[in-house]
Amino acid sequence: MGAAQLIVTGGAGFIGSNFVRHVVTHTDYSVTVLDKLTYAGCEENLADLPEHRVRLVVGDVADREVTRTLVGSLDPERDAVVHFAAESHNDNALADPSVFVHSNIVGTFALLEAVREYGVRLHHVSTDEVYGDLALDTEERFTEGSAYRPSSPYSASKASSDLLVGAWVRSFGVRATISTCSNNYGPRQHVEKFIPRQITNLIDGVRPRVFGDGAHVRDWIHVDDHSSAVLAILERGRIGETYLVGAGCERSNREVAEIILEVCGREAGEIDFVADRPGHDVRYALDARKLEQELGWRPRHRDFTAGIRETVRWYRDNEQWWRASKAATEATYAKNEQ
Ligand code: NAD
Ligand code: DAU
């Protein structure tokens, strides 16, 4: 019998392609990536991976025929689907939520119907944003028991997809797990996101642009650690369970901008504070003890400044990867900031 097959939806994006790389390095699975190649997906993210292990199918996860055909080709005894495909950026969802409903909700529905029909194991990748936000002046952190309280169109679409997964587990016996992860950083993240935006701004001689007063807090995790967590949950997680994935690295946006400035040899005060994001979630922080205690998972990247230094180096060394998207991204932000 050959090695197991994985379908990885959204495998040409930032985290999905990191996961595919992780799987190729640490397992003998073969991978079929199903990806629509939206503005956020890029074939080049998979270009260095062996062709006999990774194949790309360009298609929409919400297309029932495409999804059904691919899932139907799997062996339910040993193969699985890992679902990353989604529209992922809050500012885009504020400008036009419709594609978020399509890809994140209808896409997950299509996949659930396919895994239900063929009895295939599914892991669904979600976000800590489904739990809403926390106050700055508490030590409180999200747990798997936190109430769903999404506050943005993006997080509401992800929360909806999680609820569908939970219902398909209970009502139809679908074998699924969910992970809700905190903010990722690392190589190949689109320049619309906070950290790559500021790094590439600085490369272009533009000061970091921080929304509001910069006091908003995010809980950062290196993308490699997210990938190792997803693989652990896929292989050893209990069916029907949700696992929070986080590395215990809370930083305010202002602190993150200052670390990037320091790594780039600039002064800490060189920040432009710009118009705030409407409905901006104040703070995310999560408790990953269930994942650590049940599955023995630990983050490997524990030094955030070292991780940022490595990420800055990647963007400096790979300008051809991001340059084409930068101007359009900044034009969109300029419109929002007016
Ligand atoms: P990304 O935007 O970099 O990549 C998304 C990928 O999905 C792209 O390759 C895109 O082409 C593909 N895609 C989008 N719509 C599709 C569709 N309808 N059919 C097929 N493919 C489609 O996103 P990311 O940051 O890598 O996030 C991946 C997943 O992880 C998402 O589900 C996101 O909600 C979740 N997540 C992200 C973070 C984070 O910090 N970025 C944290 C927690 C969870
Ligand atoms: O928490 C997990 C989520 O993290 C994921 O589900 C999302 O897919 C991912 O995009 C991310 O959401 P955020 O909205 O937290 O990420 P973003 O990189 O857009 O912004 C991080 C913080 O930085 C947030 O407080 C907004 C702020 N920000 C962002 C940009 C782009 C700025 O201050 N300036 C900026 O230019």
Image: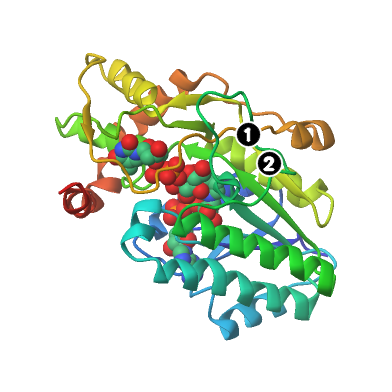
Could you say which quadrant of the image residue 94 lies in? bottom left
Identify whether 261 is placed above or below 29: above
State the residue in front, 61 or 131.
131
Q: Position of residue 263 (x, y in %)?
A: 32, 18
Query: Dot 1, how many residues are within 10 Å of its Cα: few (below 14), some (14-19), or many (20+)?
Result: many
Q: Position of residue 294 (x, y in %)?
A: 84, 36
Q: Position of residue 30 (x, y in %)?
A: 66, 59
Indicate the quadrant of ligand 2 in the picture: top left
- Mark number, residue 286: 1
Q: Secondary structure at mark 1?
A: loop
> Can residue 189 be seen from the camera position used here?
no
How many marks the image carries: the answer is 2
For the point 63% across and 47% down, the residue is 180
> Can residue 158 be seen from the camera position used here?
yes
Q: Is residue 270 left or right of residue 236?
A: left
Query: What amino acid type should be assigned to the residue bearing mark 1?
Result: Leu
State the residue in front, 24 or 198.
198
For the point 45% across and 61% down, the residue is 87
Q: Is residue 30 left or right of residue 255?
A: right
Q: Are marks 1 and 2 in contact (CB under 8 Å)?
A: yes
Query: Dot 2, how many residues are within 10 Å of its Cα: few (below 14), some (14-19), or many (20+)?
Result: many
Identify whether 168 is placed above or below 268: below
- Residue tagged by mark 2? 244
For the point 56% across and 69% down, the residue is 105
Q: Is residue 293 left or right of residue 283?
A: right
Q: Position of residue 256 (x, y in %)?
A: 38, 25
Query: What amino acid type should be assigned to the residue bearing mark 2?
Result: Leu
Instruction: Give whichever of discs 1 and 2 has the lower sequence position.
Output: 2
